[in-house]
């Protein structure tokens, strides 16, 4: 089996899409062998080099025409990559060995930051051939896509536009998206953000993608794509096997002291600072454990998720899930929050058993006294109070979800 990895061919402003280049390659390669798999692999969402969603692609082909296959792929990348964008640094990898040997590298590219030199060293050690254009940063993603662990996976059906329409507004019958969603959810996911009333299947960049539908079965996403009504030509539809919607990027860390910038983590702590909101609508709070303090953020695009966050109080036990950035302090950009244990009682002055009225303090260390009948009590008492938040897993809404984030429906 020959594995081909491709990355960093597109440009945010000028368009193109590495997945489209993979489809062009697949079409060509079908004449040179049997294409076994075409995968779309998302890598570390916290890195600065990404154009959009840090995607890379890999194709697996059974072939005895290895030289022709390599030539064909190289020509397709050379003819289609956006070399004029200073941030586009294409990379290609060809590998005939067992992809498992690249698995550790995949996990590092998914959860950490790696250098081009590291990718070269691994490629050379494992006998993978690579081709770099300009800086050739794309070999990182290309190598990682080949090594990706897709034991847990989802699928995406991507529909592409005819070249003449690239850059033009996309006209999609939104009603057909709602109908498709009603028929296929939860086997498809993140088609619509119902709380915002927004269709999510179309990108907003000048790229060749018309729409993409994500789901848990290749057949379902293919059928779902056919349900979408558009008033332009769909040039082709490709089904990718992906690590999207799997939470593969998240790593559980045992303590706050272990949280590193640019990683994506799951960490438990106790709320020590009540959430606060800043201009722009971003909400923050802080958690602690015995090793340190960590700031958590629900940014404005997370919309109604912030209403939940604002209901946390000091003492609540939570498990934060998200990507870590370092601005002034280490901050977790929340993707999910598991509310593990809520504070449900608070200390209040005792109630007079005779008058049913709250007692008043008789002064420091003097206990409490009923103003009406004079009944006395020594101690404050615990009283339950209502919380408008539950002990369960919360997620940001689909509109703010990262490609890698597992949708809540997968936890039910
Ligand atoms: P699109 O979603 O349109 O494909 P993108 O967001 O995937 O765009 P790329 O153009 O692929 O962005 O650029 C990402 C670059 O970052 C690639 O060169 C890739 O090899 C590199 N890269 C990916 N993961 C890491 C990582 N963990 N550390 C360092 N570089 C990485």
Image: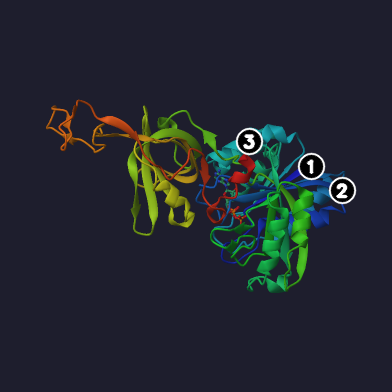
Q: Height in image: 372 above or below 67?
A: above
Which residue shows up at 69% across the image and 73% down it? 165
Return the residue at label 2. 33
The residue at the point 55 percent across, 51 percent down is 401
> In terms of secondary structure, where does tag 3 sit?
helix
Q: State the residue in front, 121 or 286.
A: 286
Circle 3 or circle 1, nearest the eye: 1
- At x 65%, y 63%, the residue is 16
Tag 3 and tag 2, C-beta contact below 8 Å: no
Q: Residue 64 is drawn in which quadrant?
A: top right
- Which tag, 3 or 1, sits closer to the chain's start? 1
Q: Which mark is residue 258?
A: none
How far apart are the two marked residues, 3 and 2, measured between alpha carbons? Answer: 27 Å
Residue 142 on image: x %, y %: 66, 46
Residue 257 percent across, percent down from the top left = 40, 31
Query: Is there any visible trace of residue 389 in the rendered image?
Result: yes
Examine the rendered structure and indicate whether residue 125 appears above or below residue 299.
above
Residue at screen point 81% across, 57% down: 27
The Cα–Cα distance between marks 2 and 1, rounded to whole angstroms, is: 10 Å
Label whose residue precedes the other's in the sequence (3 or 2): 2
Label 1 environment density (alpha carbons within 10 Å; few <14, some 14–19, many ≥20)? many
Q: Residue 210: in sight, yes or no?
A: no
**Picture coordinates of residue 118 (x, y %)?**
57, 38
- Disc with the residue nearer the chain's start (2 vs 1): 1
Q: Vertical placement of 143 versus 368: above or below?
A: below
In what element is the residue under mark 1?
A: strand
Q: Label 1: which residue? A: 2
Q: Residue 226 vs residue 303: left or right? A: right
State how far apart marks 3 and 1 are (Cα): 17 Å
Q: Which residue is denoted by mark 3 in the rendering?
A: 122
Q: Which mark lies nearer to you, 3 or 2?
A: 2
């Amino acid at each position: 089996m020959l594995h081909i990895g491709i990355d960093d061919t597109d440009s945010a402003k000028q368009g193109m899409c590495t997945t489209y280049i993979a489809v062009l390659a697949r079409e060509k390669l079908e004449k040179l062998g049997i294409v076994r798999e075409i995968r779309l692999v998302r890598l570390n969402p916290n890195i600065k080099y990404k154009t959009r969603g840090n995607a890379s692609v890999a194709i697996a082909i059974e072939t005895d025409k290895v030289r022709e296959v390599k030539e064909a792929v190289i020509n397709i990348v050379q003819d289609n990559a956006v070399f004029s964008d200073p941030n586009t640094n294409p990379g290609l990898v060809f590998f005939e060995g067992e992809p498992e040997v690249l698995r550790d590298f995949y996990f590092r590219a998914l959860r950490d930051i790696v250098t081009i030199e590291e990718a070269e060293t691994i490629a050379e050690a494992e006998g993978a051939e690579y081709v770099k254009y300009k800086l050739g940063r794309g070999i990182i993603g290309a190598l990682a896509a080949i090594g990706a662990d897709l034991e847990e996976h989802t699928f995406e059906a991507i529909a592409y536009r005819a070249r003449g329409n690239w850059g033009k507004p996309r006209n999609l019958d939104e009603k057909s998206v709602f109908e498709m969603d009603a028929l296929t959810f939860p086997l498809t996911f993140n088609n619509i953000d119902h709380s915002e009333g927004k269709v999510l299947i179309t990108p907003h960049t000048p790229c060749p993608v018309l729409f993409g539908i994500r789901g848990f079965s290749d057949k379902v996403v293919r059928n779902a794509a056919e349900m979408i009504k558009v008033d332009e030509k769909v040039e082709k539809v490709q089904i990718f096997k992906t690590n999207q919607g799997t939470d593969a990027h998240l790593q559980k860390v045992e303590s706050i002291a272990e949280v590193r910038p640019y990683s994506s983590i799951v960490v438990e702590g106790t709320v020590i600072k009540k959430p606060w909101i800043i201009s722009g609508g971003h909400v923050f709070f802080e958690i602690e454990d015995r090793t340190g303090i960590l700031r958590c953020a629900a940014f404005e695009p997370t919309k109604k998720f912030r209403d939940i966050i604002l209901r946390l109080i000091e003492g609540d036990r939570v498990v934060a899930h998200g990507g870590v950035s370092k601005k002034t302090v280490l901050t977790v950009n929340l993707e999910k929050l598991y509310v593990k244990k809520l504070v449900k009682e608070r200390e209040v002055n005792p109630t007079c058993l005779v008058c049913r009225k709250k007692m008043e303090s008789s002064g420091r260390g003097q206990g409490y006294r009923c103003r009406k009948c004079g009944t006395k009590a020594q101690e404050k008492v615990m009283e339950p109070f209502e919380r408008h938040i539950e002990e369960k897993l919360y997620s940001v809404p689909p509109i703010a979800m990262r490609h890698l984030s597992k949708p809540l429906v997968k936890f039910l």
